Image (cartoon, rainbow, N blue to C red):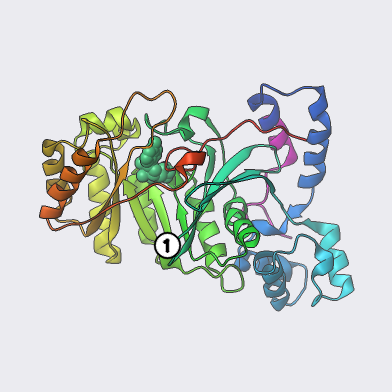
Amino acid sequence: MVSSSHHSLDPPSSTILEAYFFSSPRIGKGSLSILRKDLMISSRINLKSFTREGLKDLITSLGWKTYRADQIFQWLWQKGSIEFDGMTNLAQRYRAELKRRFRIGQMKVCKQIPAQDGSVKYLFQLEDGVGIESVYMPEPSRRSVCVSVQVGCPLHCHFCATGRSGFIRNLRAWEIADQVVTIQRLEGVRISHVVFMGMGEPMLNLDEVLKSVEILNDDLGPNIGARRMTISTAGIPEGIIRLIHFPLPIKLAVSLNAATDRIRSLLMPINRRYPIRKVIAALHRYVAMTNRMVTIEYVMFQGLNTTKEEGLRLIRLVKKLKCKINLIPYNPIDGCDLLPPEEDEMMSFYELLRTAHKTVTIRKSRGKDVEAGCGQLRSRPLSVS
Ligand code: SAH
């Protein structure tokens, strides 16, 4: 039999129940039926919890041939099966056995909100009732999805809406990968790029994030090239170092947002634990070991981090780092007193960096009119029905 120490299965039902009781202030008598549903859901192992390798171990432990795992994986992650009956290349007795032992996890699409620029914000409801958001971003040359990796976020960056709703839980790998395949199915397009830049901090849920990368990259699954997936971090050195040894060549972006610790700590409390020099040191090691370029993300705020002084410091800081710089105008969020810079302030900061011969781009956030822009995603209360 498979032991849960080797494979991360869904949490036992008691964990879900506890999470419900202790995290939801709105729980009432009417919610009992949902709790009962959770109990039924989690009594069987979710087959989507496994990478193809994991599924092979599981399937062979049943005494079945390994190629059955390939078939099942393909049904789940390429053909989007939501039930075992449709798995027509498996004999009836196999399907019956699968049905008896396992289940196929599913999340609900609650809302699709199109923005004027063509991007679409998706609101999903997960099996335990919590809500997450993802964004579909079509461009002429690519079709990207921005995925969430946590429900809420524990980092509480001053300028980001996600942390304001607190931290609820990590997402499972399948819940991350499912955002991509669900959007792919509903939009009727092939998703070419995935950015891990939605709700949450990927480095604080790295096992599940990397497992989702493996699923998304699988050629019997969504088959998205590793070089077309980017993990964005607030700058957690241990996580950056761990990525060095991950076999798939995914891309790395780091939200620097300031060049002095005083300013960065004001913006991002995590900077008190991992100051700028530690983050930059980890990046140097990452580049040296992987020979890959990294992206420095830099959200611009009026009068705070776009001064000439701060620009020159930034140049000095990344001078020897193989990187490009991605400037992001701040998207105002409720309850934050900061402002985006004026156009000319942004342009002179941009020009300053350009003189240092760095590749610099200004990223226009997508879907701002529907609060789908960078830092605007948050967990909203969902009416559970
Ligand atoms: N936790 C990860 C990924 C989520 S944030 C990280 O910190 O990188 C993704 C990007 O959006 C980060 O670069 C972050 O600095 C930026 N961001 C957050 N809030 C923003 C806002 N209100 N306006 C513009 N960019 C924002």
Looking at the figure, which quarter contains the N terminus? Answer: bottom right
Question: What secondary structure prevails in the magenta region?
Answer: loop
Tell whether position 9 is magenta: yes
Viewer-closest of 220 and 3:
220
Q: Residue at x 31, y 30 (%)?
A: 339
Q: Which residue is pictured at 73% across the width and 24% down the height?
A: 27
The image position of residue 371, as x and y in percent, is 49, 38
Residue 27 vertical position relative to residue 79 in the rendered view, above or below? above
Q: Residue at x 57, y 35 (%)?
A: 379
Amino acid found under the numbered disc labelled 1: Phe
Asked whether 155 falls inside the magenta stretch, the response is: no
The reply to whether the residue tagged 1 has its Cβ within 8 angstroms of ligand 1 is no
In front: 192, or 40? 192
| Rendered location of residue 370, percent (x, y) | 52, 40
Tag 1 residue: 246
**Residue 125, above or below 320:** above
- Residue stretch in magenta: 1-18
Badge 1 crowding class, 10 Å Cα cut-off, few under 14, some 14 to 19, many 20 or more, is few
Residue 65 spot, x, y in % from top left: 74, 77
Which quadrant of the figure shows ligand 1?
top left
For this orientation, the residue located farthest to the front is 116
User: In the image, what residue occupies the spot 60% across and 63% down?
Assistant: 51
Q: Position of residue 4 (x, y in %)?
A: 66, 52
Looking at the image, residue 259 lies above or below residue 74: above
Q: Secondary structure at mark 1?
A: loop
Q: Of 44 and 169, which appears nearest the observer?
A: 169
